[in-house]
């Protein structure tokens, strides 16, 4: 992304000198790049699973444990990705339960 500053024109920016304005614009761009980098790193660790079978149980903890076991086994068995204990930071079921399956499921890996 390129930002240009015309230093030939008089400044109408509340008394900032051209040098201060340039410093401000550069700092703003650096802040945006840093924020974009953090967001990208966070999204790189998201995994979305589709049509995950869900255990029929009234106990939420039991369903969560079953989800984690399924996802861990799938990542290990199919993709050869071995997760350490507590590697899944966030586990979310998305969509309505239909015939024992949700449309999607998501997890964030540390």
Image (cartoon, rainbow, N blue to C red):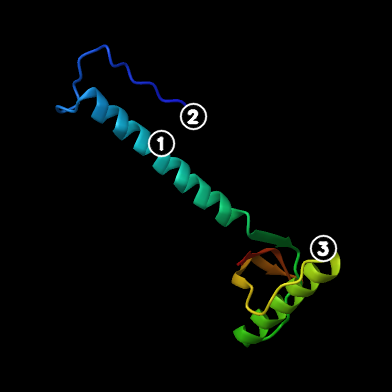
Q: Which of marks 3 and 2 is nearer the N terminus?
A: 2
Q: Do the residues labelled 1 and 2 touch (CB within 8 Å)?
A: yes
Q: Distance between the residues labelled 3 and 1?
A: 38 Å
Q: What residue do we see at 34% from left, 20% from top?
A: 5
Q: Is residue 66 above or below residue 50?
A: below
Label 2: which secondary element:
loop
Q: What residue do we see at 46% from left, 25% from top?
A: 2
Residue 61, horizontal then vertical, whole percent: 61, 85
Q: Is residue 99 above or below residue 64?
A: above
Q: What residue do we see at 63% from left, 72% from top?
A: 88
Check disc 1: other Cα within 10 Å, few if <14, some if 14-19, many if 20+: some
Label 3: which secondary element:
helix
Q: Is residue 54 above or below residue 22?
A: below
**Residue lying at the far front of the rendered structure:** 19
Q: Name the residue under label 1.
A: 29
Q: Is residue 105 above or below residue 40?
A: below
Q: Mark 2 points at which residue?
A: 1
Q: Mark 3 points at which residue?
A: 79
Q: How far apart are marks 1 and 2 (CA)?
A: 8 Å
């Amino acid at each position: 992304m390129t930002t240009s500053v015309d230093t030939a024109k008089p400044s109408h920016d509340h008394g900032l000198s051209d040098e201060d304005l340039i410093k401000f614009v550069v700092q703003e761009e650096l802040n945006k790049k840093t924020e974009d980098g953090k967001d990208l790193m966070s999204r790189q660790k998201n995994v979305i699973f589709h049509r995950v079978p869900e255990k029929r149980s009234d106990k939420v903890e039991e369903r969560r444990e079953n989800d984690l076991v399924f996802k861990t086994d799938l990542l290990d068995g199919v993709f050869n990705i071995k997760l350490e204990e507590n590697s899944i930071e966030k586990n979310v079921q998305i969509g309505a339960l239909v015939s024992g399956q949700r449309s999607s499921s998501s997890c964030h890996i540390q």
